[in-house]
Amino acid sequence: MLFDTHAHLNDPAFDPDRDALIRSLPEKGISLVMNVGCCLESSRDCVAMAETYPHIYASVGSHPDAANEVNEEVLEEYRILCKHEKVKAIGEIGLDYYYEDIPRDVQQKAFWMQMALAKELQMPVIVHERDAHQDGLMIVKDFPGVRGVFHCYSGSAEMARQLVNMGWYIGFTGVLTFRNARKAVETASCIPL
């Protein structure tokens, strides 16, 4: 049994054959999928897909690129969506300072608010963090009872140790295959967990 823990099946790239693809996953060995929300609209879509397909689960949240949408009304919508039995996490939330399309203070506030929601609802989180290592770590430390995964980890070995010691999971993705990722691979491979 394989569990795809981070998919974006509502991405427009899947428009031509989404239904056929999703229905074929179990016969291809992928028994479960976590379809991850990135904004309010995609979070609603993820929940709708989870209602439609028995092997699809959902998370709801606003990615750093959608941090400017996070307010009390959006959080209330997420609270309502989280009542659905197949919503299992808050995410994809976090910080992304690589492009800085959304100001850092706006991203930090949105991340903090969604971490507070996860604490309130006692749900795990899916964190996207890019080039914001110290700020990301400081915010998660504000919520010692909240756990989850840094799904596309690119921080230091020391930060990884801190996260693991705090009960977090760390995911490594295709970023490790980039030409300039050699240092990250060497660092990640020597983390004594």
Image (spheres, rainbow, N blue to C red):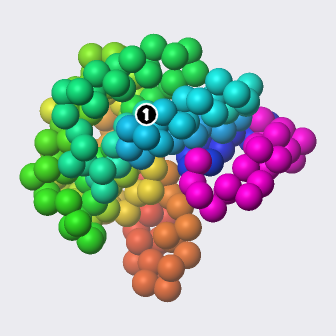
Identify the residue position indicated by label 1 in the image. 60
Q: Is residue 55 above or below residue 101?
A: above
**Residue 18: within the magenta?**
yes
Counting from the top left corner in percent of width and height, residue 116 is at: 22, 26
Identify the residue at image location x=45%, y=78%: 181
Please give left or right for residue 113 compared with residue 3 in the image: left
Residues rendered magenta in the picture: 10-31
Identify the residue at image location x=70%, y=28%: 52
Toward which corner of the image does residue 98 lie, by quadrant?
Answer: bottom left
Q: Is residue 89 above or below residue 171?
A: above
Does any portion of residue 59 appear in the rendered image? no
Q: Amino acid at mark 1?
A: Val
Front-lying residue, 126 or 168: 126
Residue farthest left in this picture: 105
Identify the residue at image location x=54%, y=37%: 45
Q: Residues within 10 Å of mark 1 (few under 14, many from 20)?
A: many
Counting from the top left corner in percent of width and height, residue 154 is at: 37, 63
Does any portion of residue 112 appear in the rendered image? yes
